[in-house]
Image (cartoon, rainbow, N blue to C red):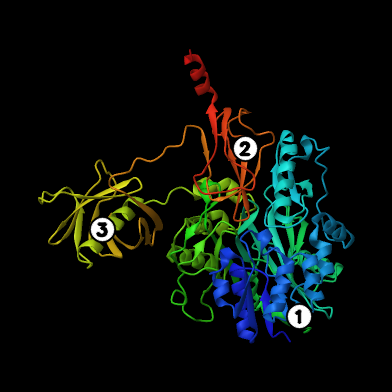
Amino acid sequence: MIESLLVANRGEIACRVFRTCRARGIATVAVHSDADAGALHVREADAAVRLPGAAPADTYLRGDLIVKAALAAGADAVHPGYGFLSENAEFARAVLDAGLVWVGPPPGAIEAMASKTRAKELMAAAGVPLLAPADPATATGADLPLLLKAAAGGGGRGMRIVRELSDVEEELRAASAEAASAFGDGEVFAEPYVERGRHVEVQILADAHGTVWALGTRDCSLQRRHQKVIEESPAPGLPDGLRAVLREAAVAAARAVGYRGAGTVEFLISPQGRPYFLEMNTRLQVEHPVTEEVFGLDLVALQLAVAEGAALPAEPPAARGHAVEARLYAEDPAGGWAPQTGRLHALEVPGPELFPVAAAAPRLRVDTGYSDGDTIGVHYDALLAKVIVWAPTRAEALRALRHALRRARVHGPGTNRELLVRSLGHPDVTEGRFDTGFYERHLDALTTPVPGERYAAVAAALADAAARTTGDTLPARLGGWRNVGAPAQRKTYGEHEVRYRATRGGFVVEADEGDDGDEVQVIAAGPHRVSLEIGGVVRHFEVRAYGDEVHVDSATGAYRLIARPRFSETSHRAPPGSLLAPMPGTVVRLAPGLAEGARVTAGQPLIWLEAMKMEHRVTAPASGTLTALHAVPGRQVEVGALLAVVTDADAQDVQEESSP
């Protein structure tokens, strides 16, 4: 029996495993980098061991240090979580060699599936349907588009879609470099890219006594940069015959490698309904909660039981209802999915009071590795929380999850919350017509600015005024200008300037000049709550200020505003053509041959930054000459750091013509 468990991971998954351990009476041990010294998973564990450093390569990817930590803390078992070393056969063997229980599949099974190229060979022998491989060196136009994939790892890193033959060589080089950086293995292979395919997977669970469960299906087609955003179970709209084929193929895959524990077999479903094996993840998946909710299981508890030698019942419980999970990321979807960093002031999703306890009522679950006041850094994944809803039907689950996200208080760096809300209500999603290209087609429409920001700015200004005057809620009116003697106060948030006056009866706010929007009146204004009547409808705004950062939440949208100083200071301006770091991160590589004096073309990728386990390309803003280069591979940079300067070709011609 396991008495004390170390989780060789961090954040949300470590907290998730600890939750089950507490329920089963198992002591818990955390490991942490210096950057995670105060993290939630460290605070929740019974004991914690420091891994010196901050970079994953120095900490969470150091299997030798983690085994030493387990022995030093008196743990008798290790759970790998997901990511990092969770699919590393050498680490699994090191854990077993140290006399510890490994809560995962046998090292041989991990090894068999570690390389996607070798895994496909095994699956072909087991009769699992596959896509034919492609050779990028001999590819012709008829073979396009191609999908380049890293042979190791997952999470979308080392993947590229190639639609032009002229791009094959560069994309191969980029995919290989990214794979080597993320997984220590630069092997890349190619296969046909299936347009408008769906990503459907089967959760499996196997014991050491010959029983293999196939726990329904999950649809994970809603992805950005080949990383999942919204998942659900069961996968909607699949014929019963296809579901049976997927279950049988998943069980065959597990038996082919002598699998034990929890794992996932992933498939691509073509528009014609043909399934193709993608890969097998020899670990627990991020999206496992939707399967747990539908089957009424605790997969972590079952992992622990299997690791202790328990036998599974011959058949799993019956599935019931529908579950949907949304991944709340600290990122900017409209800005190339750039990760966002900073202090998380508040993270609160409406709980049981939103969904009353009843047999057929929707229920809400939030899995997170953060709490109020934590800092979101640059070293790890941008996932803030997973918000999961179960309901009797898919339509109810989508609606309830959308409502919960709309009602959530997420104060701090920018997030993808609004994208999630809009995605869950999009007709293609509600009617089950989506595929892996959903965001490529709809991202612009889904990331248009939230309407009503002007009203949020009014609410923020009035809340600030109420807090600085009496601190009480004051009645007020918003209308035309009134001559009450006192000069108007001004407060600016982004592009919105709000002008108001305080009177004995409350506040008077001047309407924007030339404003032809809805007629607005202020019903009440307090330090944290403002009520506005907009177009005859009263709307309530909850306001919280954290210095110059103000968050305004309402039923129609959430707004993150930055208060501008009344008198702006003269600031340093970067020279024209500057390439600035869009986020804090590490420079991982430069374009081949990039040096001062090089000629570049508009849109050409010049510098690659890595932040939160994702790579981001910084491109040339115009065609011209690279006149300055400050980026150095391996160097960490802050947001806004000057990386390089490109002098526009036209501007350079003008300078040369005007020179004596």
The answer to whether marks 2 and 3 mark residues whose Cβ atoms lie closer than 8 Å is no
Q: Residue furthest top?
A: 660
Mark earlier in primary sequence (2, 1): 1
Task: Give the image location of residue 240, x and y in percent.
Answer: 72, 66
Cα–Cα span, label 2 and label 3: 46 Å
Question: Against 402, is 495 above or below?
Answer: above
In the rendered image, is residue 391 in sight?
no
Q: Which residue is mark 1?
A: 306
Of 384 and 46, the residue lying toward us: 46
Question: Is 515 situated left or right of 428 in this image?
Answer: left
Mark 3 lies on a secondary structure that is: helix
What type is the residue that disc 2 sits on?
Leu
Q: Mark 3: which amino acid?
A: Leu
Q: In the image, 615: left or right of 354?
A: right
The mark that comes first in sequence, 2 or 3, is: 3
Q: In the image, which disc is placed on residue 462? A: 3
**Badge 1 amino acid:** Val
Name the residue beneath numbered marker 2: 606
**Residue 108 versus residue 508: which sits nearer the camera?**
108
Q: Residue at x 46, y 47 (%)?
A: 448
- Residue 139: which disc? none
* N-term-proximal mark, 3 vs 1: 1
Residue 522 lies in what quarter of the image?
Answer: bottom left
Side of 637 where 473 appears, left or right: left
Q: Nearer the viewer, residue 122 or 283?
A: 283
Q: Is residue 435 above or below residue 91?
A: above
